[in-house]
Image (cartoon, helix red, strand yellow):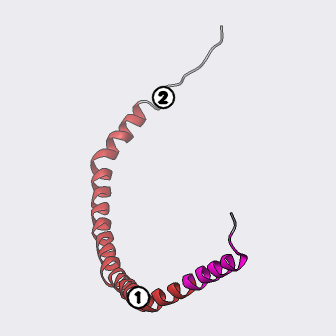
Amino acid sequence: MRSFNSVWRLSHLTFINMKLWCYRIITLIFAVPAAILWGLYFALLTFMYIWCVVPCIKATFIKIQCAGQLFGILVRTFVEPFYIAFGKVFSNIHITVAKE
């Protein structure tokens, strides 16, 4: 069975127009509030990053830098002499490989 061609054309035209107008109405209702919410979200995110996160990271790096200098002094004072001594003890060892 087949229906009339005009029915197919009319149903296709109705579908296309309904889809277009539903999209336009939904966009009109939800696009502006969504744009406002996303704008506020990204503004808050940018504010938090610039005024809270970056200063905390910088302050942490300053503290870590002081601790790193102290750690370096401790290593050079207590650990490095042992490695220098072991290096001098084992510096005269020579290995030769002979094939038989």
Q: In the displayed structure, does residue 11 sit left or right of residue 90?
A: right
Magenta segment, which residues? 3-19
What label does residue 39 carry, if any? 1
Which residue is most to the front? 1
What label does residue 92 carry, if any? 2
Residue, x 36% and y 83% (percent of image)? 41
How far, Cα to Cα, is label 1 from label 2? 71 Å
Question: Which amino acid type corresponds to the residue marked 2 in the rendered image?
Answer: Asn
Question: Which amino acid type corresponds to the residue marked 1 in the rendered image?
Answer: Gly
Label 2 residue SS: loop
Residue, x 46% and y 86% (percent of image)? 26
Q: In the displayed structure, does residue 77 sit left or right of residue 7?
A: left
Q: Where is residue 36 in the image (x, y as percent from the top left)?
A: 39, 90
Q: In which quarter of the image is residue 10?
A: bottom right
Q: Where is residue 24 in the image (x, y as percent from the top left)?
A: 52, 89
Residue, x 30% and y 45% (percent of image)? 79
Q: Position of residue 70 (x, y in %)?
A: 27, 60
Q: In which quarter of the image is residue 30?
A: bottom left
